[in-house]
Image: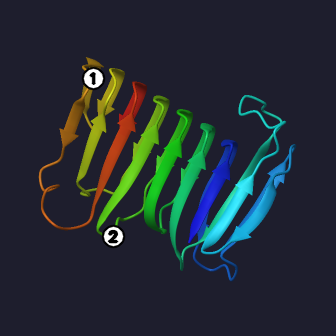
Amino acid sequence: MKIAFVPGAADLALRVDPAMSEPYELDFDGVLPEVRPVTGGVVVDFPRSFHVRDRRNGGRVVLNAAEPWEVEVQGRTSRVRADLRGLRLAGLDLQGGVEHVHLDLPEPHGRVPVRVAGGAADLTIRRPAGVPVRLAVTGGSTRLAIGERRFATAQPGYVFTDPGFAEDGDRYDILVAGGADALTLV
């Protein structure tokens, strides 16, 4: 299944429920999106009046853990907390940049791509303990933290690879296409 948010996502809480019977549940405040079921998923389409900086809009999204999911945001992502632990995540694609985003990733199944296009400001990614990851940042970085390692700055094209990542197995492949400020990978 796939859930796509257009033209962005703001003030959202995403979580997983293994006991729910429906594929997803959506609850929104303020500007209400059009929710369109499509083959293999759902599109959450906010009207043109939606603006990610407007804090009157928010919502809660619950995904059924029985389904594998791809999550996509086609536009800016701001003030989003995604606790995806327990989900079978097929991929995560955040287009248009992110700010103030916290991701709790589930146990991966195979190589799971995570893509952030447009740069990142205040992005925290938590992975399960012991899961190998590759993190590539195409632009320059400031305030980069990977586990216990801290970098005031990192040059464009910085790549961090955990031991064991190259082996076949369950892992995350994270790409931040653009610069990053306050990027934390735990």
Q: Considering the image in quadrants, where does the C terminus appear?
A: top left
Vertically, is 3 above or below 49?
A: below
Q: Where's residue 45, x and y in %?
A: 75, 52
Q: Amino acid at mark 1?
A: Pro
Q: Nearer the viewer, residue 87 or 97?
A: 97
Which of the numbered marks, if any, corresponds to residue 156? 1
Side (left or right) of 168 relative to 154: left
Name the quadrant containing residue 75. Answer: top right
Residue 119 in view here: yes
Circle number at residue 94 = none
Ranked by sequence position, the earlier of labels 2 and 1 is 2
Among the 4 quarters of the image, the one containing residue 88: bottom left
Q: Is residue 81 above or below residue 3?
A: above
Disc 1, SS:
loop
Say which residue appears at 35% left-offset and 65% top-offset: 108
Identity of the residue drawn at 81% across and 39% down: 48
Residue lying at the far bottom in this picture: please name it: 21
Which residue, given by chain and number where applicable, does mark 2 sit on? 109
Q: Amino acid at mark 2?
A: His
Residue found 40% across the figure and 28% down from its top? 178
Q: Position of residue 64 (x, y in %)?
A: 60, 74
Residue 186 in sight from this viewpoint: no
x and y, in percent, of residue 135 in the image: 28, 41
Mark 1 is surrounded, within 10 Å at the Cα level, by few (under 14), some (14 to 19) or many (20 or more) other residues, namely: some
Image x and y of residue 113, in percent: 36, 55
Residue pictured at 31% horizontal, 55% vertical: 172
Position of residue 162 relative to residue 52, above or below, is below
